[in-house]
Image (tube, rainbow, N blue to C red):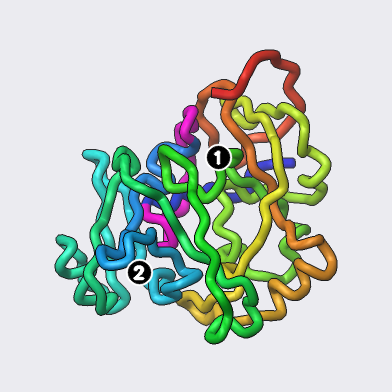
Amino acid sequence: MRVLELWRYPVKSLQGERLDAVAVGGEGLEGDRRFALFDLETGFGLTARRVPELLFAGARLTSDGGVEITLPDGSLATDDGALSDWLGRPVALRRAEHSGPRRYENPVDFERERSSRWEAFTGAPGPFHDSRRTRVSLVCAETLRSWDRRRFRSNVLLDGGGEDGLVGSTVRLGEATLAVGNYIERCVMVTRPQPDGIDRDLAVLRTIARERNGRLAIGALVREPGTVHIGDVLEPAAIAGPAL
């Protein structure tokens, strides 16, 4: 398997940036999920599960470790006020260093989400990942079939197929070493519309539920940091010790 694409998402649920190379450390790709928007009235972190409009804004990491957010109309959001005006609710952009609660919501029934009960869950500490078991997400092009890879927001797109067989193994990717520990469970996020003609499509999640037991892509923790480039080969690695 070889790296076809690398993606970083500086703000949770916003569009990210495609990279030629990226440093990978204990918290994942440098700058990935370093920021998230929080609803100041409910206290919940906002994702495109609850607020699909988020996927129509983009985020770019800046050289000083900050983030530049481009709203759907092409304007830059320079403060929380601009973000609140866009979303029609009071929100705050928070960094991963924020120590407050990390609660998000997911509809129990994605087929009938308007009437569905919504369940709350607690996300991971550090960067705003949903799961403690994932700091780098990987998926193969064959697994995605004809679906647009942007629906799945994986960090690493690999050529070929067969990534499911890597779960439980340690792999070398560029200069980094990863412990692949889990399959990624999919939710209503993969059905959401996005820019450039990606329409709302419930069939995506129905198919994943029926044919893949609700799972698509794999998640890994980082054992040894390093830089990953487009074209790097993923290969087995024999290394002992806990993940970073």
The reply to whether the magenta stretch includes residue 12 is yes
Q: Is residue 206 above or below residue 185?
A: below
**Nearest-to-viewer mark from 2 and 1:** 1
The kind of residue on which mark 2 rests is: Ala
- SS for dot 2: loop
Q: Residue at x 60, y 29 (%)?
A: 174
Q: Residue at x 24, y 45 (%)?
A: 66
Q: Quadrant of residue 106?
A: bottom right
Location of residue 112 in the rendering, given as x and y in whole percent from the top left corner:
62, 84
The reply to whether the magenta stretch includes residue 87 is no
The kind of residue on which mark 1 rests is: Arg
Q: Which residues are magenta?
A: 11-27
**Is 32 left or right of 182, judged from the image as shown?**
left
Q: Residue at x 49, y 32 (%)?
A: 24
Location of residue 148 in the rendering, given as x and y in whole percent from the top left corner:
62, 69
Location of residue 121 in the rendering, given as x and y in whole percent from the top left corner:
52, 55
Q: Is residue 242 above or below residue 199?
A: above
Q: Residue at x 72, y 57 (%)?
A: 216
**Is 139 left or right of 126, judged from the image as shown?**
right
Asked if disc 2 and disc 1 are in contact, CB closer than 8 Å, the reply is: no
Location of residue 108 in the rendering, given as x and y in whole percent from the top left corner:
62, 71
Distance of label 2 from label 1 (alpha carbons):
26 Å
Front-lying residue, 73 or 102? 102
Q: Quadrant of residue 208?
A: bottom right
Front-lying residue, 38 or 244? 38
Residue 148: give its label: none
Q: Quadrant of the N terminus?
A: top right
Q: Earlier in the sequence, mark 2 or mark 1?
A: 2
Residue pointed to by mark 2: 57
Residue 132: give its label: 1
